[in-house]
Each structure stands twice: as structure tokens, then as C-alpha cells.
Amino acid sequence: MPDLAILDKAVEALMQCHQAQGSLVVLTGAGVSKESGIPTFRDAQTGLWANYKAEDLATREGFLSNPAMVWDWYDFRRNSVWQAEPNPAHHALVDLESLFPAFTLITQNIDNLHQRAGSQCVLELHGNIFRYKCLERNHPVSLDLLADSEASPPHCPVCNAWVRPDVVWFGEMLPPKVLDRAFDAAAHATLMLIVGTSGVVHPAASLPQLAKEAGATVIEINPELSALTPFVVDYFLQGPAAMVLPELQSALTRRLVALEGSHG
Ligand code: BJW
């Protein structure tokens, strides 16, 4: 449960951003999907995957040393995500987007849940688990085509290289256009809201610092302090995103309705 006095200050900061027609930029990480039943990236892996570290599997080297295993890991995660539903945190972000004409949602998540909830402007920094490409030349490969293949991993129909998920592994460049847009949004943010990220993976973790240096107010929602909390955060709202985000969004809506009422 967040401290009510801090929640109130955070709502006030959002009000000011709204009244000034400022730009609201949201950065999300795995914690936003936790209440949809998806484990965070650094949560201990369970079941079949309990003996592996996610950090070792999400690399080109990991894939090359055991392609079938990494393929199966992504298959398993894709199935879990497919069965999951967006939670109240995803929905609250859709509502916030409707309140702020200048709104950008930057996500590190690959689970597609923001889009499934109805968010319109989503910058996916680390790709999407429902897209595939080939390992060597980035040829896009459709999921339908993969359904017919029994190979694990399948081969690219154009160049015969292995197929891999279209996500960003450690040591790989982020999609340059998406990253440019994210940096631009952060540099012009009036307010940045960080939700459910450990803040340890760069360049995503540099975005709040950039926003802060450009004068933005920074609000963070997380049950635990992150690597960013001591350095950039003005208002830390402690708690699960699926509880705190709807609270923040509905408190803001109440304030806006009251303001409209007072203006007749
Ligand atoms: C809740 C909650 C609830 C729980 N509600 N919250 C500068 C300094 C140091 C290193 C680097 C640097 N620049 C680049 C690097 C190297 C590297 C890096 O950052 N390493 C660090 C780990 C040290 N970065 C890269 O390699 C990046 N590429 C790059 O920089 O290219 C340029 C280059 C290339 C070559 C040479 C030189 C330069 C690429 C990074 C790609 C990251 N990819 C992954 C995998 C995606 C695919 C997959 O999922 O399999 O992305 S790694 C993983 O971490 C995933 C996530 O998107 C990302 C961030 O994790 P996130 O979302 O923060 O999750 P968690 O689990 O860490 O945290 C969850 C949080 O939720 C916690 O805080 C909880 O408390 C909280 N929580 N319950 C709200 N209910």
C-alpha cells in the first residue's frame, strides 16, 4: 500500500502535467505483468527451467550453444503469455493515455499485453515474443509458417538459417528507430512514470535519468526499491502495479472531474 501523502503528491504532479498540456512518458518492465501471472525476468525460474538463469538463455551465445533448449524456453513463455490476460495496471495505462494528448508508453516487455489491453502508442524496446525472424539475416518469419514445422528451432524459408524470436538479447542493439523515439520522448517528458522495472538493463534504464536531467518529475511504482529509486525518483509509490496504478489513475480522474465541475 503506498503512503497516502506521497500518492497525493504524485496525483498533484500528474494534475500539473495535465493542466500544462505536458508530456507523460511511461516506462514499464516485467512487474507490470506480474498480476497477469507472468513471472518477472529475474524471478527464480520454475519447473523445467528451474536450473537455468534467464540471463544465460537470453543471449545469442545461449541460443547457439543449445538452440533447441532456448527455442523450447521461448515456446513455453509464448504459450504462458498467450493464455494470460491484461491486468488492471495495463488497463489503467490505457485510461491514462486517453487523458494526456502527449503520451508515450515505452515498454521493455515482449508480452504484447499493453497492446492487448488497448494501449495505442507503445514503443517496444526489447521486441515481441509473437514475432519471429531468422538468426542470420533478420528475415521475418510468420507464426503460421512455424506452426507447420516440426523442427526445433525451425529453419528460415528464405535462407535456411535458424529461426529465433524477434526479441533483443543481451549484447544486441535495440531497434534503432524505436530507441530514437524513446530517447526523444524521455528528453521531452514533463513527467515520467516508471512501473515494475529493476532498472538494471541499459539503455532502457538510462531513460529516466535523461528525463530527470531534462527537468521531468519522476514517479515510480514498485513493491521494492529499484536501481533507479535513489537517483531519479521524486515520488516512490510502493506496491503492486495492478493495485497502485488504478488508484493513481482514478484519483487523477476524480481531481479532473472536480476541477471541471468547479469551472461550471
Ligand atoms: C513489480 C511487481 C508488481 C515485481 N508490480 N512491480 C551500461 C551499463 C552497464 C551495462 C550496459 C550498459 N549499456 C549496455 C549494457 C549491456 C547490457 C546491460 O544492460 N547489462 C546489464 C544487465 C548490466 N545491455 C544490452 O546488452 C542491451 N544492448 C545494448 O546495449 O546494445 C548496444 C551494444 C551492443 C553490443 C556491444 C555494445 C553495445 C540489450 C538489452 C536487452 C535486454 N533483453 C532482455 C531479454 C528480452 C527477451 C526475453 O524476455 O527473453 O529484456 S533482458 C531482460 O531484462 C528483459 C527485460 O525487458 C529487461 C528488464 O527487466 P525488467 O523488466 O526490469 O524485469 P526484472 O525482472 O529485472 O524486474 C522486475 C521488477 O518488477 C522488479 O523491480 C520487481 O520489484 C518489480 N515487481 N512484482 C510492480 N506486482
Image (cartoon, rainbow, N blue to C red):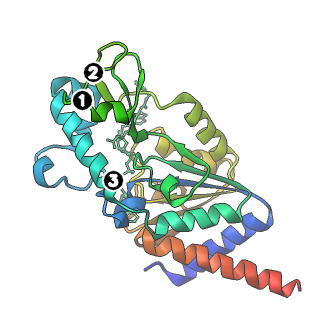
Taking 102 as reference, is 62 left or right? left
Residue at horizontal 14 percent and vertical 47 percent from the top: 49
Q: Crowding near pointer 3: few (<14 within 10 Å), some, many (20+)?
A: many
**Relative vertical location of residue 253 with respect to residue 138 in this rendering, above or below:** below
Q: Crowding near pointer 1: few (<14 within 10 Å), some, many (20+)?
A: few
**Relative vertical location of residue 91 with respect to residue 199 in this rendering, above or below:** below
Quarter of the figure with residue 37: bottom left
Tell me the number on the disc at residue 174: none
Residue 229 appears at what percent x and percent y? 46, 59
* Residue bearing the label numbered 1: 149
Q: Crowding near pointer 2: few (<14 within 10 Å), some, many (20+)?
A: some
CA distance separating discs 3 and 1: 21 Å
Residue at horizontal 54 percent and vertical 55 percent from the top: 232
CA distance separating discs 2 and 3: 24 Å
What type is the residue that disc 1 sits on?
A: Ser
The quadrant in which the C terminus is found is bottom right
Residue at horizontal 30 percent and vertical 46 percent from the top: 78
* Residue bearing the label numbered 3: 81
Residue 46 appears at what percent x and percent y? 15, 55
User: Of label 3 and label 1, which has the lower sequence position?
Assistant: 3
Q: Are marks 2 and 1 in contact (CB under 8 Å)?
A: yes
Taking 123 as reference, is 174 left or right? left
* Residue bearing the label numbered 2: 155
